[in-house]
Image (cartoon, grey):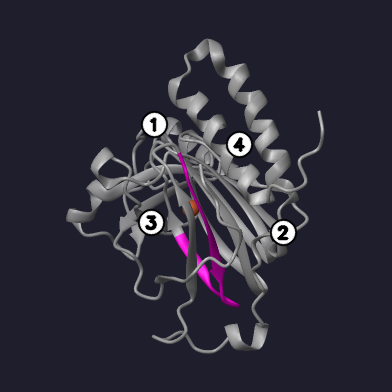
Amino acid sequence: MPRDNKTPLIQKIAKKANVTFKTLKTSSNDDKNVFADKQSGLISLVTEVRAADLKIVPRKPAASSAAPGRENPPVTYMHICETDVFSMGVFLLNAGASIPLHDHPGMNGMLKVLYGKVSVRCYDKLQDGGAAPSQFEPPLAQSQVGSLRRSVLRSVAEYSDNSGPCLLTPVQDNLHQIDAVDGPAAFLDILAPPYDPDDGRDCHYYKVLQPAAQGEGTDGKSNEQQQVEEKEKDEEVKWLLEIPQPEDFWCVGEPYPGPTVSV
Ligand SMILES: [Fe+2]
């Protein structure tokens, strides 16, 4: 088959993302291998992409480290395309900027750094609610207890433009916090299906709670309770509190300068 060198890489990625995630949408459990095959093709294409493919000029560290304000949002977003199967765009982070811990309910995702470096902390929500510690630091109001989510810290990793994509699924690595490391950074973001609050896929923000120090004593806990707490420590179990969007984080749209994409 002749190589297709005329089609922009981002167009190939869009087409491949559409067929890949369409498979997932319509397939039964028996078709998991079909999805896996298509997904590995998509990962190969996404691994190749760099800022220049999207005509994005990396931000200068000095300009992007200015104090955040109306003229200098910490994060901007370039929308590339969206279908009912997936959405694709680019997040650009100033030096020191962070996209706070958030989720992608029922969604798959791929994050590929285009320039700079990011640190990604991924969490899984645990289905088993478990018993929350009796106290957190600072203490919770009774009304906040219903917003607690038991989770596990799944991974912490750094990604640069030479790294492959960071993946998330509806059940694994679905929550993440993304921090720019050592200067400004940008990444391509593919989500499937797209966020849609009318279909139960709204974005929620979280903060990680610290259990209040209990001292070295057993405080009258049963052996069983102590064993559970030790196991949770080993597994990096974290308690997350759903919070409103943090005030120091906001994201403003900016034009996408790259090749036109049609799906
Ligand atoms: Fe995300």
Please state the horizontal and vertical placement of residue 223, each as a whole percent of the image. 45, 32
Please state the horizontal and vertical placement of residue 124, each as a whole percent of the image. 48, 40
Q: Which residue is mark 2?
A: 50
Please state the horizontal and vertical placement of residue 215, each as a whole percent of the image. 46, 57
Q: Earlier in the sequence, mark 4 or mark 3?
A: 4
- At x 57%, y 44%, the residue is 14
Q: Which residue is mark 3?
A: 206
Q: How many marks?
A: 4
Q: Secondary structure at mark 3?
A: strand
How far is the residue under mark 1 from the one under mark 4?
Answer: 32 Å
Q: Earlier in the sequence, mark 3 or mark 2?
A: 2
Q: Which residue is mark 4?
A: 16
Drawn side of residue 254 relative to residue 159, left or right: left
- Does 98 appear in magenta? yes
Whether the residue carrying mark 4 lies under 8 Å from ligand 1 is answered with no
Q: Say if 249 sits above or below 84 in the image.
A: below
Q: Say if 115 sits above or below 236 in the image.
A: below
The residue stretch that appears in magenta: 86-100
Q: Earlier in the sequence, mark 2 or mark 1?
A: 2
Residue at the extreme left of the image, as rendered: 143
Q: Secondary structure at mark 4?
A: helix
Q: Earlier in the sequence, mark 4 or mark 2?
A: 4
- At x 36%, y 35%, the residue is 130
Q: Is residue 172 visible?
A: yes
Drawn side of residue 35 relative to residue 81, left or right: right
How far is the residue under mark 1 from the one under mark 3?
Answer: 17 Å
Q: Secondary structure at mark 2?
A: loop
Q: Earlier in the sequence, mark 1 or mark 4?
A: 4
Name the amino acid, label 4.
Answer: Lys
